[in-house]
Image (cartoon, grey):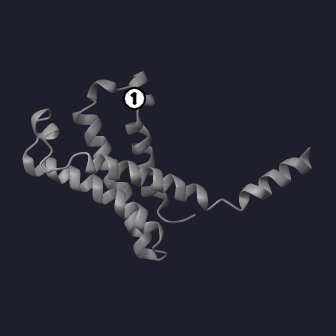
């Protein structure tokens, strides 16, 4: 039985670098989609429903889109710049998600909605990239 576990783990250890890349692509693409969904600028949903100024609403949309793009591109920059870009993208995700929870979902605190929403997982993803950077 131990031999099975050893072979199983050895097989998948060949793909260890793929896990963070897939996670990065998932979070990055989600932010690109969320950002693009707010175009054309200024996003009416943010200005009308949440009462944000056109400038701030546009900044949110551009920030989401650019964060997703930077997060994906930073993976391929194998130097301290890519590491820093990944952490900055993670920081921006954390800031965006905390603001989203504070403004749009403040009624979710410690509820089923909080723990089953994609926003929670995006926040966790942002924290992951903020802490981990480009290190595998």
Residue under the image location 35 percent in, 56 percent down: 68
Quadrant where the N terminus is found in the figure? top right
Q: Nearer the viewer, residue 105 or 19?
A: 19
Residue under the image location 49 percent in, 65 percent down: 134
Residue 104 appears at what percent x and percent y? 24, 33
Residue 4 appears at what percent x and percent y? 88, 48
Q: Is residue 54 above or below residue 16?
A: above
**Residue 80 seen from this side:** yes
Q: Nearer the viewer, residue 44 or 106?
A: 44
Relative to 55, is 87 on the left or the right?
right
Residue 135 appears at what percent x and percent y? 54, 65
Residue under the image location 39 percent in, 44 percent down: 123
Residue 101 appears at what percent x and percent y? 29, 35
Residue under the image location 44 percent in, 44 percent down: 124
Q: Is residue 136 above or below residue 42?
A: below
Q: Is residue 116 above or below residue 96?
A: above
Relative to 11, is 20 on the left or the right?
left
Relative to 64, is 81 on the left or the right?
right
Outermost residue toward the bottom in this view? 79
- How many labels, in total? 1
Quadrant where the C terminus is found in the figure? bottom right
Q: Nearer the viewer, residue 26 or 88?
A: 26
Q: What residue did someone put label 1 on?
A: 114
Per the image, label 1 sits on a secondary structure element best described as helix
């Amino acid at each position: 039985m131990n031999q099975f576990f050893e072979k199983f783990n050895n097989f998948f250890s060949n793909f260890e670098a793929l896990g963070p890349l897939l996670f990065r692509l998932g979070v990055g693409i989600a932010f690109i989609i969320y950002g693009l969904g707010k175009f054309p600028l200024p996003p009416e949903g943010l200005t009308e429903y949440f009462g944000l100024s056109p400038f701030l609403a546009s900044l949110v949309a551009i920030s989401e889109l650019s964060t997703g793009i930077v997060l994906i591109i930073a993976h391929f920059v194998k130097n301290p710049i890519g590491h820093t870009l990944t952490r900055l993208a993670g920081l921006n995700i954390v800031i965006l998600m905390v603001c989203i929870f504070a403004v749009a979902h403040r009624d979710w605190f410690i509820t089923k909605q909080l723990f089953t929403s994609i926003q929670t997982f995006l926040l966790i993803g942002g924290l992951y990239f903020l802490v981990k950077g480009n290190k595998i």
